[in-house]
Image: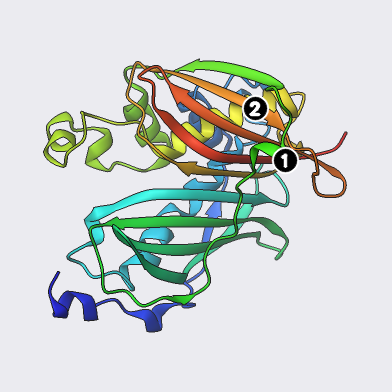
């Protein structure tokens, strides 16, 4: 990377929030997302409550806006989704009016690229908190970024902090048309998820599943196995994206109970492995309101 490109990291943009955007939540949109992520939850499919990871949909364009002011244009398309952490204050339900904004809050140069932390806020139109999110973006092969600001909170759970055996194992299958359905429901039409030739051109084995679609599959498993099917009980969901999943693969998610959860909650660690033998989700953490 040239000196000019290194200087193009605009650290002064850290802490600068995008303009606040308004979103009217409809049952049609939340149902479409539930179907696109293979939810079997009756309340989600009836449009009574949005799937937890639907929280990314209203704010998705603002995440791009937040990065665009910070990241050199020459490396912007090298981005991969590193981590996502959703802290849920209340579920999203159709009929809500949401206010959202995003900001880059931290950055650092890692051995093989640059890490950027994006913070997201979602509130009701009355100002009540709905969710706060942390996104870690990794720009492959980039360098020259200063270490400034704050990075995303950790969600790693050690083996000694969780139950010895999984409390649940859930198997799900990615459909062959999963990425196309997810793109329509989420608004994420990046070509690596829809154009096989393009995906191979950038070094992938072909079209890959959206990381947030995989996270939604994780949410399906957690809500079913740890929340008794009640979406509103899920209070935090965090993942690290490790390897891509492919259409047609089977995803196996193993869930362990965390031995020392926050007060008033149960907590669960999880990871997912695909039928290709890759662990695609690491450091999964879910916090659930105790019943």
Tell me residue 167's x, y (percent).
72, 22
Mark 1 residue element: helix
Horizontal side of residue 240 vs 288, given as left or right: left
CA distance for labels 2 and 1: 13 Å
* Residue 280 visible within the image: yes
**Image vertical order of residue 34 relative to residue 262, above or below:** above
* Image depth: mark 2 or mark 1 in front: 1
Which residue is the site of mark 2? Answer: 255
**Way the structure is coloured:** rainbow
In-front residue for pair 83/110:
110
Question: Against 206, is 198 above or below?
Answer: below
Question: Residue 249's image quarter?
Answer: top left
The answer to whether residue 43 shows anywhere in this view is no
Count of all numbered marks drawn on residues in the image:
2
Image spot of residue 42 (x, y percent): 66, 20
The quadrant in which the C terminus is found is top right
How far from the left and from the top, in percent, is residue 136?
A: 45, 56
Q: Taking 153 as reference, is 272 left or right?
A: left
Which secondary structure lies at badge 2? strand
Determine the residue positioned at 57% across, 50% down: 85
The answer to which quarter of the image holds residue 94 is top right
Q: Which mark is residue 161?
A: 1
Which residue sits at x=49%, y=65%? 102
Mark 2: give few (<14), some (14-19) or many (20+) Cα within 10 Å.
many
Residue drawn 82% across the image and 43% down it:
265
How many neighbours does mark 1 have within 10 angstroms: few (below 14), some (14-19), or many (20 or more)? some
Residue 203 horizontal side relative to residue 109, left or right? left
Q: Is residue 259 left or right of residue 72?
A: right
Identify the residue at horizontal 55%, vertical 24% (top origin): 253
In this orientation, which residue lies closer to the viewer: 148 or 79? 148
Q: Which one is earlier in the sequence, the residue at label 2 or at label 1?
A: 1
Q: Is residue 89 above or below residue 6?
A: above
């Amino acid at each position: 990377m040239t000196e000019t490109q290194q200087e193009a990291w605009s650290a002064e943009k850290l802490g600068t929030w995008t303009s606040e955007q308004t979103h009217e939540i409809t049952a049609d949109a939340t149902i479409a997302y539930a179907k696109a992520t293979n939810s079997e939850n009756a309340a989600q499919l009836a449009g009574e409550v949005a799937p937890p990871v639907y929280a990314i949909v209203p704010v998705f364009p603002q995440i791009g806006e937040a990065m665009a002011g910070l990241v050199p244009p020459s490396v912007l398309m090298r981005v991969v989704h590193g981590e996502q952490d959703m802290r849920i204050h209340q579920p999203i339900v159709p009929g809500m009016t949401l206010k959202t904004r995003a900001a880059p809050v931290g950055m650092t140069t890692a051995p093989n690229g640059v890490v950027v932390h994006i913070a997201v806020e979602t509130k009701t139109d009355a100002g009540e908190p709905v969710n706060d999110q942390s996104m870690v973006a990794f720009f492959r092969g980039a360098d020259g970024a200063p270490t400034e600001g704050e990075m995303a909170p950790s969600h790693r759970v050690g083996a000694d902090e969780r139950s010895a055996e999984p409390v649940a194992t859930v198997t799900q299958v990615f459909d062959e048309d999963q990425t196309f359905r997810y793109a329509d429901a989420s608004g994420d039409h990046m070509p690596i998820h829809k154009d096989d030739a393009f995906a191979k051109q950038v070094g992938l084995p072909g079209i890959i599943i959206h990381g947030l679609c995989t996270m939604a599959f994780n949410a399906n498993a957690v809500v079913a196995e740890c929340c008794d099917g009640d979406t509103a009980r899920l209070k935090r969901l965090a993942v690290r994206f490790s390897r891509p999943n492919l259409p047609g693969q089977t995803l196996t998610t193993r869930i362990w109970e965390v031995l020392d959860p926050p007060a008033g909650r149960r907590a669960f660690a999880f990871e997912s492995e695909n039928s290709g033998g890759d662990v695609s989700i690491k450091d999964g953490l879910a916090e659930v309101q105790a019943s």
